[in-house]
């Protein structure tokens, strides 16, 4: 029998013949698909197909990198170093980050040399050391193990404990929110509603719109306030204009005059001495003689557009509840899907309102006033000392003082007021600096009053340890220290390496809890986690400046608005414009002004962006640590440092959000 033959034997060979096949013939007949697979022609086509797919993938990646590079290059060319950042960037924090970066680069160079020289220092005896570099490296390792590592381990353990405490607090807030949803706990209105036919049964309400150089949004905010559904003889709208632009003042006055001619009870106020920012503006307005005739005051910032039934959804909660001092509504955003920056802000603020404000309102009857979209009982403001100009968070200041005087607060999660989110990183950064420096200023000023107040010990503990220390001081401290300083430091000090659950599992779980109030944002889980760590440098710097009363703690910059409106607002605006055209005054001066505006050429504003040196320094620091982690094959640590460094690079080059004009 041939060695490559196949023999088939049948026990009952009735009508069956014995067939003997050679090797090549047997394979082609028994396995035709195998013969087809090894066809040289089709194998060539298979290789061509794979090559074409690989080429398409590479070309797509090349185009993506090219587009990103061109975009970054264009924005860098149009950028300048932030003037507001300049003096502070040369401060202690920036110098510390730079020094840390230079040391890390030097350490990385030595580690690379040791890696390629294959120094196994555990097996090298002192007399076997060759060269100054190797001796220096061994000396550094000995010094690191004996002195540096214990300090870093102690600091990292301290920050991890703070991290776990803050995570536990956030988890308890989420449990409280789930309990509210499960039990359907909502503030209820005591007593019957107001008699619609009898306007005298409605309380007197004062509506205040503080603004300063709000050219883009003043029309929509005034129009929304003037369309509030409330008896006209029981409401007064104050437009509190602190603008320093004479032309803008005339435009706002003209807008107020138009609404007054339509029968709206509205007044225009402009201060000659504009001190105290928003607090000074509100304080000046409350000093008017006619304010004593009003019982409640509703406050809306210039970009807020309340629904017409806002007052009817909030004011009735005060009826039959004399201890109630504040009713706060929730914010809703017209531009939350405008860009990545607004999407990430929406996640933060949805958690703030849905979880923090709602839980504190239901279980503690206290939370920080958001400065707008709220209604105050004027008596509560007066009993608490009124508006003070001592901090940049006048809203939190009045809320704490009212709480110390025994007033209760209600948060209405179902009542939403449209507003805008900052669309540029510069505007958002300045906003966050004010929001995180002001609370530390206030904590220094309010601590004696909290300790000597007549409220219960539990309420004092909540104010001091939870409201101020944990959520306003500890959170930015450990976020910056743990993830921006200690984590890259541990890459060069392996003895103090952070466990995976600290840098991965717990942060992802907490970020997931943050996203639950806005489930449509789930795809942005990882960008949100990186974004929050990136913003920690701004929040930490603001917290330190507020705590130690540095110059930047007193800065107040009005958040830049774009004047975006929802689709329904645009339709209402179009209808309003049609009606106004029929009743508009056709005075000669008005026609001349209109012709001048048409003839005037609108200057083309050059859009630019900033360079943020703290973020750039931290970006290179984290990328250096990522390179060191790659040598040690740390895995998760490397990927976290790499993507966190890239996120800092994006922020430092101002590649997120819109450019500013």
Image (spheres, grey):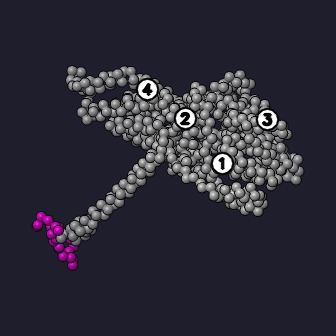
Relative to residue 582, is residue 564 drawn left or right? left
- Residue pointed to by mark 4: 153
Judge whether residue 497 can be spotted in this image. Answer: no
SS of the residue at dot 1? Answer: loop
Mark 3 or mark 2, which has the lower sequence index? 3
- Residue pointed to by mark 2: 539
Mark 2 or mark 4, which has the lower sequence index? 4
* Rendering coords of residue 463 (x, y %): 66, 29
- Residue pointed to by mark 1: 215
Is the residue under label 4 in contact with that under label 2 (CB below 8 Å)? no
* Rendering coords of residue 620 (x, y %): 41, 37
Q: Nearer the viewer, mark 3 or mark 1?
A: 1
Q: Nearer the viewer, mark 1 or mark 4?
A: 1
Between the residue at mark 2 and the residue at mark 4, the CA separation in whole angstroms equals: 24 Å
Relative to residue 146, is residue 47 drawn left or right? left
SS of the residue at dot 4? Answer: helix
Q: Residue at x 21, y 23 (%)?
A: 128
Magenta segment: 1-24
Relative to 15, does residue 206 appear above or below in the rendering? Answer: above
Relative to 607, does residue 464 appear above or below in the rendering? Answer: above
Between the residue at mark 1 and the residue at mark 4, the CA separation in whole angstroms equals: 53 Å
Q: Residues within 10 Å of mark 3 (few under 14, many from 20)?
A: few
Judge by depth and name the residue closer to the eye, 132 or 614. 614
* Rendering coords of residue 258 (x, y %): 77, 53
Between the residue at mark 3 and the residue at mark 1, the CA separation in whole angstroms equals: 26 Å
Between the residue at mark 2 and the residue at mark 1, the CA separation in whole angstroms equals: 29 Å
Between the residue at mark 3 and the residue at mark 4, the CA separation in whole angstroms equals: 56 Å
Is the residue under label 4 in contact with that under label 1 (CB below 8 Å)? no
SS of the residue at dot 2? Answer: helix
* Numbered label attached to residue 287: 3
């Amino acid at each position: 029998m041939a060695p490559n033959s196949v023999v088939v034997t049948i026990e009952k060979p009735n009508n069956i013949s014995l067939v003997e096949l050679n090797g090549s013939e047997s394979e082609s007949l028994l396995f035709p698909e195998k013969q087809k697979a090894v066809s040289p022609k089709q194998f060539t086509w298979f290789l061509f197909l794979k090559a074409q797919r690989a080429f398409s993938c590479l070309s797509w990646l090349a185009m993506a990198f090219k587009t990103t590079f061109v975009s970054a290059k264009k924005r860098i060319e149009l950028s300048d170093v932030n003037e507001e950042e300049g003096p502070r960037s040369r401060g202690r924090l920036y110098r510390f980050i730079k020094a840390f970066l230079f040391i890390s680069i030097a350490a990385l160079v030595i580690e690379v040399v040791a890696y390629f020289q294959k120094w196994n220092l555990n097996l090298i005896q002192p007399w076997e050391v060759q060269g100054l570099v190797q001796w220096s490296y061994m000396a550094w390792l000995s010094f690191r193990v004996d002195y540096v590592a214990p300090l870093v381990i102690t600091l990292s353990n301290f920050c991890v404990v703070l991290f776990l405490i803050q995570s536990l607090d956030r988890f308890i807030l989420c449990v409280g929110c789930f309990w509210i949803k499960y039990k359907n706990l909502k503030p209820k209105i005591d007593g019957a509603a107001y008699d619609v036919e009898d306007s005298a049964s409605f309380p007197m309400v004062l509506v205040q719109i503080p603004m300063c150089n709000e050219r883009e949004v003043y029309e929509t905010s005034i129009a929304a306030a003037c369309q509030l559904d409330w008896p006209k003889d029981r409401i007064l709208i104050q437009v509190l204009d602190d603008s320093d632009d004479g032309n803008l003042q005339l435009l706002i006055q003209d807008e107020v005059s138009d609404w007054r001619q339509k029968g709206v009870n509205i007044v225009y106020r402009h201060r000659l001495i504009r001190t105290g920012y928003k607090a000074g503006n509100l304080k000046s307005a409350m000093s008017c003689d006619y304010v004593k005739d009003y019982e409640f005051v509703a406050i809306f910032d210039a970009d807020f557009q309340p629904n017409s039934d806002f007052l009817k959804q909030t004011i009735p909660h005060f009826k039959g509840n004399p201890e109630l001092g504040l009713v706060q509504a929730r914010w809703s955003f017209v531009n939350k899907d405008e860009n990545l920056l607004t999407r990430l802000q929406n996640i933060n603020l949805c958690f703030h309102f849905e979880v923090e404000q709602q839980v504190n309102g239901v279980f503690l009857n206290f939370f920080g006033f958001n400065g707008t979209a709220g209604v105050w009982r004027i008596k509560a403001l007066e009993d608490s000392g009124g508006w003070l100009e001592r901090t940049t968070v006048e809203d939190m200041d009045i809320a704490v003082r009212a709480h110390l005087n025994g007033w209760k607060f209600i948060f209405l999660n179902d009542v939403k007021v449209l507003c805008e989110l900052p669309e540029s990183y510069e505007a958002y950064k300045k906003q966050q600096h004010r929001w995180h420096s002001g609370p530390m200023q206030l904590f220094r000023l309010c601590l004696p009053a909290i300790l000597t107040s007549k409220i219960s010990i539990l309420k004092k503990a909540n104010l001091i340890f939870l409201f101020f220390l944990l959520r306003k001081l500890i959170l930015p401290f450990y976020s910056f220290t743990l993830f921006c300083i200690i984590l890259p430091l541990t890459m060069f000090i392996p003895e103090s390496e952070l466990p995976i659950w600290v840098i991965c599992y717990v942060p992802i779980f907490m970020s997931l809890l943050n996203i639950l109030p806005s489930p449509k944002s789930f795809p942005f889980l990882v960008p949100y986690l990186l974004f929050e760590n990136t913003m920690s440098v701004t929040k930490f710097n603001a917290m330190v400046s507020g705590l130690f009363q540095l110059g930047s703690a007193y800065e107040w910059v009005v958040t830049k608005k774009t004047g975006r409106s929802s689709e329904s607002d645009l339709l209402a605006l179009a209808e309003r414009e049609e009606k106004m055209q029929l009743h508009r005054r056709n005075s000669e001066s008005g026609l001349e002004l209109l012709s001048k505006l048409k003839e005037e050429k609108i200057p083309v504003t050059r859009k630019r962006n900033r360079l943020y040196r703290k973020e750039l320094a931290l970006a290179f620091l984290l990328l250096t640590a990522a390179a060191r982690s790659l040598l040690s094959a740390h895995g998760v640590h490397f990927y976290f440092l790499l993507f966190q460094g890239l996120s800092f690079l994006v922020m430092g080059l101002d590649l997120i959000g819109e450019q500013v004009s």
